[in-house]
Amino acid sequence: MARPMWTGVLTFGLVSVPVALYTATQSHDVHFHQLQRGTSDRVRNKRVNERTGKEVDYADIVKGYEVTEGEYVVVEPDELEQISPGRSRTIDIAGFVDLADVDPIFFDKTYYLGPRGREYQRVYALLVEALEHAGKAGLAMFAMRGKEYLTAVRSEGGLLELHTMHFADEVRDPRSEVGDLPEKVKLSPQEVKTAEQLIGMLAIEWKPDEWHDTYEEQVKQLVQDKLAGREIAVSAGPAPEATNVIDLMDALRRSLETARKGEPTQESGKARADRAQTARASRSPKPTGGKKSTATKAAAAKTSKRASATGKQQLSQLTKAELYQRAADLDIPHRSTMSRDELQQAVEHAGRPRRKAS
């Protein structure tokens, strides 16, 4: 069992229940240390005086609020400590709101709230069930770790969750932040109906276990490949093109037809991997030994030219990652620094039969 990060009392009206707060989420980000290139020496950050370049002791550091450029109001750590909200002993719910009325943009971080002891399970279960049936969340101000939070307590999956929330002045106005937002766009009923049909055809069940942070997985694979002495190259696929306004209805119809057939609207990752595997599997056969007649040599030369032209055409259709794999198989030096065209030229050159010295 995890240790609670806070313990106190949750109150609403005259009802109170001792609770404990637990972290609900965790990050799986891959963390790196900074090293000096060519060494295993760690690089450390130091607190340095900007003007003198000398290192400053932590005890000599104060906080400054910049009023104008170069002019500061200096605040001592103990002055901030005196006005710090400290640590709340209670989560006092001030009122309940409909969850449907709260825009998700206000939610920040999620924590679990559990009963602090078996003897409090009954009153805890009462609040869980009542909030679930009502579809409401309790709002409360809550101080933790020297900061004050607006929080919402809701029922989810048989337990209470506490969400820290953004204050209203922390949420930016989208009209002043996002350019080119549509004001009044005239859409035909047929366009709207077709788009709604497409959404309905592409509707899926929410299964969080099926979604993964592919970038994190690729970073871990990169580390494992480098640890094993393998080199890798990543080639991004073509960027999706924006739908032309004139072709919007046609794009909707074609997307709807594709969805009805059960076909993917874009090439899947598995399809790309299969195509890359097929490209890597195509290898030129090794020449057999033995002497050849002049006619045979001429025919072989023509065949070689045709094969060379065909091979060049095939290489031009490969991605950078596929060309890099070919270069790795041929043990071409400096391949990690080459562009796609340079990789193609190097693979072509390495694949040509070498003339024997007379």
Image (cartoon, rainbow, N blue to C red):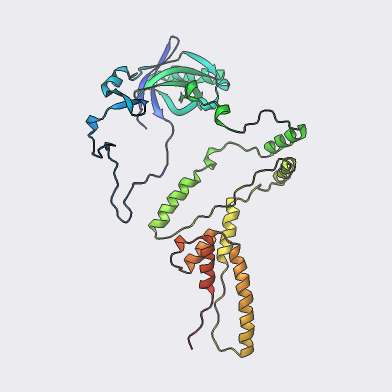
Image location of residue 131, percent across then percent down: 52, 19
Q: Nearer the viewer, residue 323 or 72?
A: 72
Q: Quadrant of the N terminus?
A: top left
Q: Residue at x 47, y 17 (%)?
A: 139
Q: Position of residue 233 (x, y in %)?
A: 48, 57
Q: Is residue 186 above or below residue 18?
A: below
Q: What residue do we see at 68% from left, 48% from top?
A: 263
Question: Could you tell me which residue is drawn at 54 percent across and 30 percent down?
Answer: 177
| 266 versus 281 height, above or below | above
Name the spot of residue 217 as percent of width and height, x first: 47, 48
Q: How many marks?
A: 0
Name above or below for residue 252 compared with residue 118: below
Left or right of residue 286, residue 88 in this image: left
Task: Return the x and y of residue 73 as percentages of the image width and height.
Answer: 31, 23
Residue extending furthest toward the top? 14
At 54% across and 42% down in the image, what residue appears? 210
Relative horizontal placement of residue 297, taking residue 246 as reference (left or right): left
**Residue 88 falls in image quadrant:** top left
Camera-nearest residue between 235 and 89: 235
> On the image, which quarter does residue 206 sit in?
top right
Q: Nearer the viewer, residue 33 or 66?
A: 66
